[in-house]
Image (cartoon, rainbow, N blue to C red):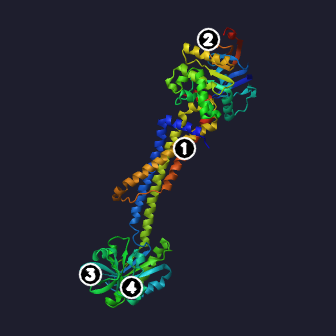
Amino acid sequence: MFDLDGWQEIFQSIGKNKLRTVLSGLTITFAIMLFTILLGMGNGLKNTFKSFFSRDAENAIFIMPNRTSKAYRGFQSGRRIEFRNHDVDYIFENYKGNIEHIIRRNQRQVDITYKNKKSNYSLIAVDPEIQFLERADPYEGRFINKLDLNNKSKVIVIGRMTKKDLFPTGVSAVGKYVNVGGLAYKVVGVFTDPGGDNEERLNYIPITTAQALYGNNDKVDQINILYNPNLSTNEAIAFGNNLTIDLKDRFDVAPRDQRGMRIQNRAEIVQGTQQTSGALDMIVIIISIGTLIAGIVGISNIMIYIVKERTKELGIRKAIGAKPSSIIKMIMFESMFITSIAGYFGMLVGMGALSYWAPGLEKYFIKDPQVDTGIVIFATILLVFSGIIAGYVPARRASRIKPIDALNED
Amino acid sequence: MIKIENLHKSYPMGKESLHVLKGLDLHIKEGEFVSIMGSSGSGKSTLLNIVGLLDIHDEGTYHLNGQLIEKLDEKKAAVLRNKFLGFVFQAFNLITYKNALENVSLPLYYKGVGRKERQKIGMEYLKKVGLEEWANHLPSELSGGQKQRVAIARALVTNPKVVLADEPTGALDSTTSHSVMELLKEINEEGMTVFVITHEEDIAAQTDRIVRLKDGIIISDEKLNNKVEA
């Protein structure tokens, strides 16, 4: 497209006109640098925000019975509402299409002892599907399973931190027996949980075991539902609302009684999260576009100024035989060269600044402020392109101007 | 070499238009050393711009080197300028950030001559105007006379048919003016057609033919016999 001589012309022009090279270069460098940094910060803010909500499954509904706070249908207030296994079956049977997993959950505080080490922990009796809700992963051994449930096995899956507390390092917990509130349970697995240390001090046993051992009844403290992930957020919220009305009616709880039956629907939080996240996205986009527009305006002004400044030189070149196309090419390539280099430089500086500042920014709720390299390259290309367009218009005018007018210009 | 018949040119001035050239007829043969004399406003610069393909005429015909000049677009004009014409301006019009040699060689770049070759030819012409030692100096480091010599070398470097000089001594003192005119004379003696525009009698007197212009028409056209003396 352009021969070596052409490039030499350009390099000479760039090298000998440092002020305008630096001016146009800095505009682009700053624009891309600010774009990168702002975008990175915005992303960091979003990352922080998202990290608050991504520890457990998002498609969860928690149903927690309690004492009623309103008199209703001839019942006095203060009555304790209790779920039993058949209530769980009722929900599952009636809302099959909306439910992926339904999990019974009983919780108690116990002392767990291994050899001479002992500490107090939450013991959670559950259906095995709890691992999907908690996003717990077996770290050693396995999670509790259907077989444990059917056999009412005295098996326990302990959290990573529980194991760390009770077992010497380097020793496998799997297959060992621990004393749980006076009863011996066999450890079948150790799990990790993205929820952090607290959730890794939880310990799971089969719900059937707990129902048989502790009171020999079929009481359920809490019902957790993982709703069908194909449901939209709005459908999930509607499902939660219908379920609430239905259960309150089934247990004769006043529709406005907030305490008797508490239903927490993650879908509502997800909706809030999506809205806030969307607002953050919008802010980031507006700021980024603003920065880019400022850059585009800047480079356009400079290009117009440069061409104006060079009018006489261009006139001379034309008088001695430069074709209009070679004039346009010269200006375009020059601006393209400067803006590309400057844009690349701005990208490096911006990304460098982000990774340099990243550790100090966590306390300002900016976590892992990264930018997508592709987006920054796109922004750079956009600016380079704007510089070319902005340069093209005056360059074409300059190439068309009669040489004599250009020469008379001072 | 240059054949002009019934040439008209006007410039729009607001709603009116200013009729600058009012039907010129001029014939310049190859190897002539012609000066166009006239006070400012006589139309002499306009004539030179048209002859130099820097501007276009409205009416009449213009033949350059036998070729009828009409409907020229900028691209064709650029090629013809590069091929047939060399310019010397009053204000020198050197490119400020290029050194003497680069300025001289630039027309060759637009002609498509390779870099090595350009420098060689450029250097030859710098030698011709006595500035080979100044090849690497920027215009700002040269005196007015030296700049004009560089400009003359640049005008000659493509080996054109005609050298057009617009007030070539206008910005120079009389001693330097004289040496620049001597240089143009030498070039002419080597066979180059030289076309000088001036308003100074003593400059015009050093040429072989003086065409006087007043208010857009030629009022006299006289041949001098300088050549015999020289």
Snapshot quadrant of residue A252: bottom left
Of the numbered discs in the image, which one, if any, rests on residue B202? 2
Where does residue B92 sit, x and y in percent of width and height?
A: 57, 24
Q: In which quarter of the view is residue B101 placed?
A: top right
Q: What residue is disc 3 on?
A: A113
Q: Given the image, on which type of amino acid does mark 4 rest?
A: Asp
Residue pictured at 64% horizontal, 11% vertical:
B205
Q: Amino acid at mark 1?
A: Met
Mark 4 to mark 1: distance in Å? Answer: 75 Å
Label 3 marks a residue whose chain is: A
Q: How many numbered circles does the render carry?
A: 4
Residue corresponding to mark 4: A252
Q: Are marks 2 and 3 in contact (CB under 8 Å)?
A: no
Q: Which mark is residue A336?
A: 1
| Mark 2 vs mark 4, CA separation in Å | 122 Å
Instruction: Give the label, 2 or 3, closer to the camera.
Output: 3
Q: Where on the picture, by quarter, is residue B169?
A: top right
For disc 2, the chain is: B
Labels 2 and 3 positioned on one and the same chain = no
Label 2's element?
Answer: helix
Q: Which SS class for mark 4?
A: loop
Work out whether disc 4 and disc 1 sit on a shared chain. yes
**Whether label 1 touches label 3, CB < 8 Å:** no
